Image (cartoon, rainbow, N blue to C red):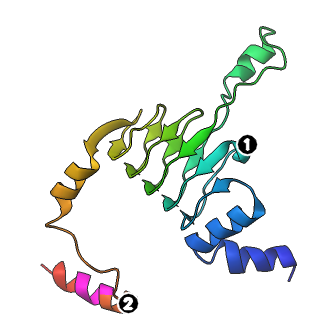
Amino acid sequence: MKMVDYLYKKIIISSPTKRAEFLKKKGHIKMGNNCQVFDNVSFGSEPYLIELGDNVRITKGVNFITHDGGVWVLRNNGLLKNADIFGRIKIGHNVHIGINAVIMPGVTIGDNVIVGVGAIVTKDVPPNSVVAGIPAKVIKSIDEYFEKNKTIVDFTKHMSPSEKKTYLLEKYSN
């Protein structure tokens, strides 16, 4: 087995935490501590323009776009020969980015933010907020999210997978 295949299977696939640690060590992106990177995340063609704070979770299929591909048309019609447009992406601390979200160039996401599934983030996101939609908009504060969910959460993080399965099957057996 080739060394690359071994690393891919043992490190890249093994867990979101190990995947993040691998990317951080390789220097692909600037990343804080305790981050998670799930499968099929694209850091685009300029990953060095992306910065992640501490405790950032990037779920499956998230795309970071660091350039405006539309300028291709302007290059081809001669209006802006050899031109490109780039933008940094900065993600604060304690941020969850939902499945298949897209983060566009030049966006800064503040601390304590939840980005909803499939959101397309085209503008800066203030701290302590939940954003969703296309384009993403603030739909509530973190405090409102807490108030809405505090009575319906299940405390399962300490459970083994089999304990969690038993608990959930019993809860939803109706």
Residue 123, position in %: x, y?
47, 31
In the figure, is residue 71 to the left or right of 168? Answer: right
In the displayed structure, 108 sits above or below 83; it is below
Q: What residue is rendered at 30% in x and 80% in y? A: 156
Q: What residue is rendered at 62% in x and 48% in y? A: 51
- The residue carrying mark 1 is 46
Residue 26, position in %: x, y?
77, 63
Residue 153 shown in magenta: no
Q: What residue is rendered at 79% in x and 17% in y? A: 75
| Mark 1: amino acid | Glu
- The span from disc 1 to disc 2 (Cα, nearest Å) is 39 Å
- The residue carrying mark 2 is 160
Observer-nearest residue: 97 or 74?
A: 97
Residue 6, position in %: x, y?
79, 80
Which corner quadrant holds the C terminus?
bottom left
Quadrant in the rendering for residue 11:
bottom right
Camera sees residue 98: no
Observer-nearest residue: 119 or 32?
A: 32
Q: What residue is rendered at 38% in x and 90% in y? A: 160
Task: Classify 10 Å Cα crowding around label 2: few (below 14), some (14-19), many (20 and above).
Answer: few
For the stretch drawn in magenta, the main secondary structure is helix
Tell me the element at label 2: loop
Observer-nearest residue: 94 or 105?
A: 94
In the figure, is residue 82 to the left or right of 49? Answer: right
Count the marks: 2
Q: Which residues are magenta?
A: 164-168
